Amino acid sequence: MGIHVFHLSVWVMAAVGIVGNLLVLFGPLALGSRGLSCHIEHTIYLRHLAASDLLMGIYLAIIATADIAFRGEYLLHEEDWRHSGTCSLCGFLSTLSCLSSTLFLTLITWDRLVSVTRPLLPRPPSRARYFSWFHLCRAAMYVRVCEPRGDGISSDKHLLDNPVLRGRYLSGNPFKTIDQRVLHNLTHLQHM
């Protein structure tokens, strides 16, 4: 019974993640933008956080669908799955979502700290934030496309094989690709 609860919880998390974050992203458009203009910076942060969490919801939906397709016979299709475009997409989505969520939570915390400790100092313009985010995503996509096949997320066995349930541990360096290292370093740079 425990494994069925786990499978169901993945579907519930995917559905809540997709629907909830779509509401956060597009709800203000449907309801109008009443009262949002005075908190535009905070709204931008929350929308970016919702976008990164939406990516995690999409990732969970893809993994749950693959789990249904491979249930009971994953080891027969392991090589095909790990070297497929879907597995690479899942690896990219999970990495981008986790690291960008961490980055945005750090930025939100930093913004709240600055607004409490230095409320009267001028704030950097929002265009700089958009510019930085755009080029960060562009660099991550470029590095991900140029990554040699067989050395990266798709070569790890963690996409469908749950180490907690199987009693095994993940092997390999968790930061194999350059885009993971860059996003990881940028995230931890915010703490300085």
Image (tube, rainbow, N blue to C red):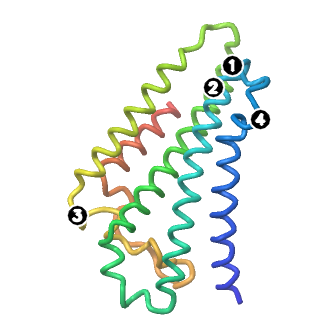
In whole angstroms, how far apart are the C-alphas of marks 1 and 2? Answer: 6 Å
- Residue 31: name its quadrant: top right
Query: Callout 3: helix, strand or loop?
Result: loop
Residue hosting label 4: 31
Question: Closest to the observer: 172 or 25?
Answer: 25
Give the label on residue 111, or none: 2
Q: Residues within 10 Å of mark 1 (few under 14, many from 20)?
A: few
Location of the N terminus (image quadrant): bottom right
In whole angstroms, how far apart are the C-alphas of marks 3 and 2? Answer: 39 Å
Q: Residues within 10 Å of mark 3 (few under 14, many from 20)?
A: few
Residue sitting at x 32%, y 71%: 84
Residue sitting at x 31%, y 79%: 80
Residue hosting label 3: 149
Q: Amino acid at mark 1?
A: Ser
Q: Amino acid at mark 3?
A: Arg
Residue 107 position in % (x across, y down): 57, 32
In whole angstroms, how far apart are the C-alphas of marks 4 and 3? Answer: 45 Å
Give the label on residue 99, or none: none
Query: Callout 1: helix, strand or loop?
Result: helix
